[in-house]
Image (spheres, rainbow, N blue to C red):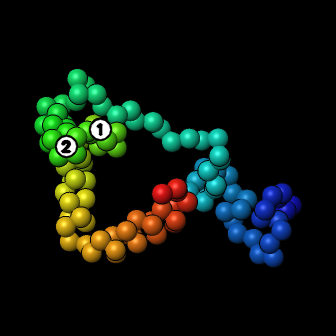
Amino acid sequence: MIGTGAAHNRKWFHIIDFAPLEVFPRFHPIPKEIVMALVAPLADAQASEAAKGIFQNLQAKMGKVLNFFRTLGHVPDILQATLAFNQAIQKELDPKLRELAYLKTTQLNKCNY
């Protein structure tokens, strides 16, 4: 018996089209009802000593600590690595090429920029 859905409109069928989700979980589309988990940005009072130090440096350099960095502050090593990577991009990459990379990444991810 041919199953219903998008698979039966194609000329060729694959086992993953009819297999239960448990058999091939990564091939089944993610329903739109599933949303990403939310990780709240850290307030200064919630941050570890390592994260607080990084936050203070960001505050001094930027005048504020963006929520993106406060969220990464849950794992200070990742926050530090992200800041180091960002610094390398800012320093080593030609500004026009960097902006082009931002725009292309935004376009690929269907984000507004």
Location of residue 99 with respect to 42 vertically, above or below:
below
Type of the residue with mark 1: Arg
The residue carrying mark 1 is: 70
Q: Nearer the viewer, residue 17 or 101?
A: 101
Mark 1 burial class by Cα count in 10 Å: few <14, some 14-19, many 20+: many
The residue carrying mark 2 is: 58
Residue 88 placed where, x, y %? 20, 65
Whether residue 76 can be seen here? no
Seen as rendered, the residue at the extreme right is 1
Dot 2 lies on which element? Answer: helix
Residue 108 placed where, x, y %? 52, 66
Q: Is residue 57 left or right of residue 12?
A: left
Dot 1 lies on which element? Answer: helix
Residue shown at 27%/75% (left/top)? 94
Q: Nearer the viewer, residue 75 or 67?
A: 67
Residue shown at 81%/76% (left/top)? 11
Q: Is residue 38 left or right of residue 41?
A: right
Q: What is the distance, in whole Å, between disc 2 and disc 1 at their CAs?
A: 10 Å
Location of residue 65 with respect to 93 vertically, above or below:
above
Determine the image quadrant of residue 62: top left
Mark 2 burial class by Cα count in 10 Å: few <14, some 14-19, many 20+: some
Task: Give the numbered dot on residue 23.
Answer: none
Residue shown at 81%/58% (left/top)? 5
Whether residue 101 can be seen here? yes
Which mark is nearer the camera, 2 or 1?
A: 2
Type of the residue with mark 2: Leu
Residue 14 placed where, x, y %? 70, 69
Among numbered discs 2 and 1, the one appearing first in the sequence:
2
